[in-house]
Image (cartoon, helix red, strand yellow):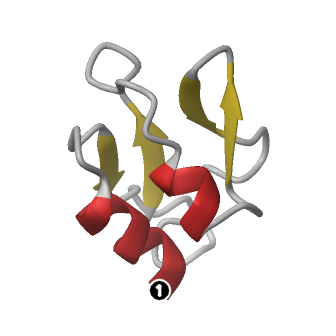
Amino acid sequence: MRVSVDRELCYGSAECAHRAPAVFEFVDGYGFVRPGRSSAGDAPEILEAAEKCPSQAITITDTPSQPGRP
């Protein structure tokens, strides 16, 4: 699962950074996914952050399988 934040939708509540600080940061008034953490989308705290995001700016998507990986 891949997680991302749409900066066009984000209005800076910082809920994501509060709920999952290991994955999200809050910079310049907006939330974003920390570098190298975008594949953490199936962790419970990430799912909660996406559900509780007041601007619905967090998206979790399936990632296609890579060769040699299930």
Would residue 8 be found to the left or right of residue 26 on screen?
Answer: left
Q: Which residue appears at 37% of the width and 74% of the height? A: 47
Image spot of residue 17 (x, y percent) = 62, 53
Residue at mark 1: 44
Which image quadrant for residue 56? top left
- Residue type at mark 1 is Pro
Q: Which picture quadrant has residue 28? A: top right
Q: Is residue 61 above or below residue 22?
A: above
Residue drawn at 53 percent across, 44 percent down: 14
Residue 29 location (% of width, % of height): 58, 20
Q: Residue at point 74% right, 42% down? A: 34
Neighbour tally class for label 1: few under 14, some 14-19, many 20 plus, Cα within 10 Å: few
Q: Is residue 32 left or right of residue 13?
A: right
Q: Secondary structure at mark 1?
A: helix
Q: Is residue 61 above or below residue 49?
A: above
Residue 5 drawn above or below residue 53: above
Q: Does residue 70 appear in the picture of this structure? A: yes
Q: Quadrant of residue 33?
A: top right
Residue at 43% from the left image edge and 39% from the top image edge? 13
Q: Is residue 42 left or right of residue 47?
A: right
Residue 6 x %, y %: 36, 26
| Residue projecting furthest to the front | 13
